[in-house]
Amino acid sequence: MVWSHVYDPLGSQLLSTLVALVPLAVLLGLLAFAGWAAHWAALAGLTAALVIAVGVVGMPGDAAAAAAVHGAAFGLFPIGWIIVAAMFLYRLCVEAGALDVMKRSVTGLSADHRLQALLIAFCFGAFLEGAAGFGAPVAISAALMTGAGFPPLEAACLALIANTAPVAFGALGTPIITLAKVTGLDEQAISALAGRQLPFFSLIVPAWMVAAMAGWRGLAGAWPAVLVCGATFAGVQFAMANFVGAALVDVVGGAVSLAALAVFLRAWKPRQIWRHGSGWHAETHDHAAVTDSLGRIAWAWAPWAVLSVTVFCWGLPSVKAVLDGRAAPFGVAAALPAAAVAPEFPVPRLDGRIAKVPPATREPQEIERAVYRFNWLSAAGTGIAVAAVLSVPWLGIPWRRAGVLWWHTLRGLAASLATIAAMLALAFVTRYSGTDVTLGLALTNTGSFYAFCAPLLGWLGVALTGSDTSSNAMFGSLQRVTAEQLGLDPLLTCTANSTGGVMGKMIDAQSIVVSATATGTHRQEGAILRRVFPHSLALALLMGLLVWLQSGPLAWMVPR
């Protein structure tokens, strides 16, 4: 028997919305203000979500429990798998001394932490977002910044702030592709409009990040580098999104901005160097007593170059099809057996038992599928793991020692993996119970002001699910239905769901745990959340303002 969503279970939209907010309020409140450990806060939020789903909304209890198990499994794989593989590679580099060489090579470009953050968190992070997505850019860039001498908590926060503008085009354009499928709108039109919204924020975010780190004085002293970094990425983002497509926007933009900034720093230096802990000092400060040869530097960076290649290849649709067993590799007659490399398991008691109803969908009833897909070969984490395995002999680490490091990595990440599992379980319960739509509907009652609120709906979706792709799948139809009812352009509101959603990436519980894990600041998730939340909200409101203007005086910016 199919159970249909009930979006106003209490007969009052205000009361139903307040009740739907409870799990999120419990999670974030306990995490940010009560000082609870992240895994306990997540379990408390999950308990609240289950009670409301079953006791208030009326979801069958076995379906709610199945949704929690489904979410926990998704949290462990593929999300947890990415973190484990990335941190294993990081440990290998630390063990071999490669991280010290990498640190000196970065400080060779500039000892200034402001400029290092631009290189690592924004440019390289954008490339990783485009190639792999999920938690890879936050985990890797935060770990690299910690290795470069950033305070761990600061590295976690900066990685989260930087991982905003690229997110809508992440994982080879998956969020845009998903939004097009859900809404029935033209994929290229969505890509083009996103490419006319996000470049403004690609200019803002690097400056925002530097100002958050070193204040206005710090931004004033580094503005030429900030401008080169932001302008090159924004220009490529606009051109690729409008004239090529969504798939390679971040990959090309991240690579071009990284190269442009590196070349620029060869010719330009700030008058004063700024570093965490030591403040301001003269540009001639001797920050590297050891000078490494080009060969030594190449040796140290090779594992990360291999990582970049593998995650990019793993994300290509043609490669993914082969690794999933959906296509035969070149020159081979038969494909890999899909049942072995990407088995699918319909979730008992959940798959096909839940239905969305209007206004969350344009159909009279939309049956929700619940299929757990264990695509162990095509997962992004596997690409990272391949890079790590290839790096073991390259770094000169004995295989026995590599095995010990692998075990230490798993043991050290156990608490973080449990936290991610609990948080994804919470997200899946809210999704399948329909309470996420209840929250979203509260924003649809704003009439002509809805254009401003449309990005905030996407922001809420990413904060709840941890994924711009999931937010688009969850709220895409609702955005289109609401726009058509209010006489707004559906292309504008649906695209705003994705571009506004990117600002929620820095506050979703999954990303916060990933950043804390990568920097060794587990149990400080609450401090990270308190630090980044104002930035997330402010940027989301700015996106709302831009979309509101594009619904009126700037309507010429919307593709026709």
Image: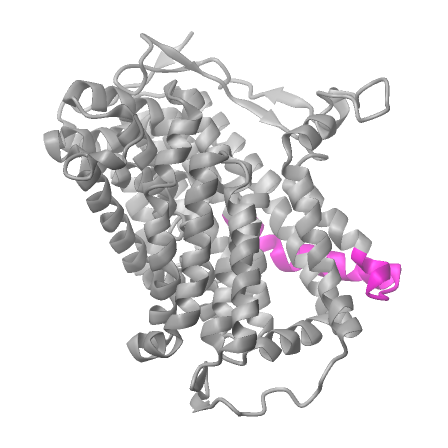
Residue for point 56% across, 58% down: 124
> Per the image, is 288 magenta?
no
User: For residue 141, what is the image quadrant?
Assistant: bottom right
Quadrant of the rendered image containing residue 172: top right
Does residue 284 appear to the left or right of 362 in the view shown? right
Tell me residue 445's x, y (percent): 14, 29
For the residue pair 182 and 3, the one nearer the viewer reads as 182
Question: Residue 50: horizontal and vertical position, in percent?
Answer: 38, 33
Q: Toward the viewer: 463 or 378? A: 378
**531 on left or right of 111:** left
Q: Is residue 271 above or below residue 225?
A: below
Q: Is residue 93 left or right of residue 259?
A: right
In which quadrant of the rendered image does the N terminus lie?
A: top left
Horizontal arrangement in the rendering, residue 437 relative to residue 44 (left or right): left
- Image mark count: 0
Residue 309 screen position, x and y as percent: 70, 48
**Which one is nearer the viewer's eye here, 155 or 419?**
155
- In magenta, the rendered stretch is 391-419
Asked whether 403 falls inside the magenta stretch, the response is yes
